[in-house]
Every structure is written in structure tokens, then in C-alpha cells.
Amino acid sequence: MRTLLAFVVVAGISGGSAFAQSADPRLFTAGVERQYKDIQALVLKTAEKVPEDLYAFKPTPEVRSLGGVLGHIADGNNLLCRFASGEAVDIDKIMKDLASVQVHEKKTAKADIIAALNESRAFCESVFAKLTDVTAQENVTWFGGKTPKAMMLTFVTSHSWEHYGNLVTYMRIKGIVPPSSEPRTPTTR
């Protein structure tokens, strides 16, 4: 009986160690990255689907054009992922010269905006690729405070979702079915 009990205890301890060692070091980070990729795919599909002549469309004069929103998403990806990468970013300098980071929202050619979205997506994905759940908890400076890298990456995702909502409205006004409303085929993950 003692031998059996000793075996169960040793097996439990060994199994627990093996489980801890085999746990995915990117479980949380990979989930955040998947959400980021999902919204970026919808944004890119929007950029590809909308005809170039509608890139200048504004529902009202006070808002960004459709192409401007797409370019703004690319600009936001670049800036927020720079913060998440841990790169030193001079936010005071940026706030004095917003045009320095609002590069793509001024573009008007569909091909240029699609290229900007692809480039910003690749940059953000390179930032994600370097993170684990542990390193994603490291703080970066954000407007004078400290914010974990993972929070910066969730912010880039929520920023993209916010502006995808603008794009959905623009498309609906013009009678275009947004990519997120298109019929879907079942997929597996």
C-alpha cells in the first residue's frame, strides 16, 4: 500500500511538472494576436472590396474619408505597435507634430493604402511574434504612465475595431455589404 501511495505521489508531482513545462508560453498572447489578425483581415478585405472612387467618400464634411479611415488604421497600427515593441517613442514630440504619425491617412490611392495596411500589419505581427505571456507583461511608457505591452496590443485591436465600425457605416450608406456581414463558410480553429 505504501509503495502504491508513493508511486501516486511521485507520479502526481512528475505529471504536474510535465504539465507546467508543456503549457503554451504564448497562450494569452496568441489569443490577443488572433483577435488582432481577425480585425486586420476585415479591414484589409474592406480596403480591397470598396472601389477606389469611394475612397474619397465622406458621410459628412467633418469626418475622415473612407480612405482616410483605412490610412488612419495603418497609422494607428504603426504607432501603437511601436509602443508595444518597447521602442522609445517621444510622445511629446508626436503631439506637437501629429502629421509625423498621420502619414497614411492622407493617401488617396487604393494601392498605396492597401500597401500601408499590409506593412503595418506585418510590423505588428513581428511585435507579437517576439512576445510570450511573460514578456507581454513588461511595461512600456504610455503618455507618462506605465502600461503592459499586452495592453498596448489590445489597444491596437480595439482601435481597429472602432474604426472598422466607421467603415461599416460608410459601406452601408453606399449599399456595400461589409466583409463581416458576408455569408461565411464554417471554419475550424
Image: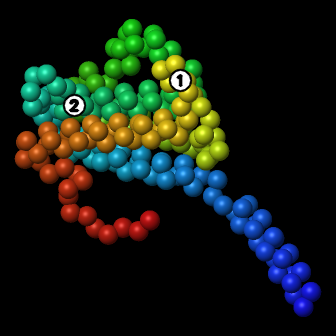
Identify the residue at horizontal 48%, vertical 35% (top origin). 152
Q: Residue placed at 34% from the left, 14% from the top?
A: 99
84 shown above or below 22? above
- Provide the secondary structure element on which disc 1 rests: strand
- Towards the viewer: 14 or 125: 14
Relative side of 167 to 4, left or right: left
Q: Quadrant of residue 2?
A: bottom right
- Relative vertical location of residue 87 with respect to residue 96 in this rendering, above or below: below
Residue 122 visible in image: no
Structural distance between the alpha carbons of marks 2 and 1: 33 Å
Tell me the quarter of the picture where residue 109 sits. Answer: top left
How packed mark 2 is, by other alpha carbons closer than 10 Å (few <14, some 14-19, many 20 or more), is: many
The residue tagged 1 is 145
**Which residue occupies the extreme right position in the image?**
3
Instruction: Say which label, 2 or 1, has the lower sequence index.
Output: 2
Name the secondary structure under disc 2. helix
Indicate whether 54 appears above or below 187: above
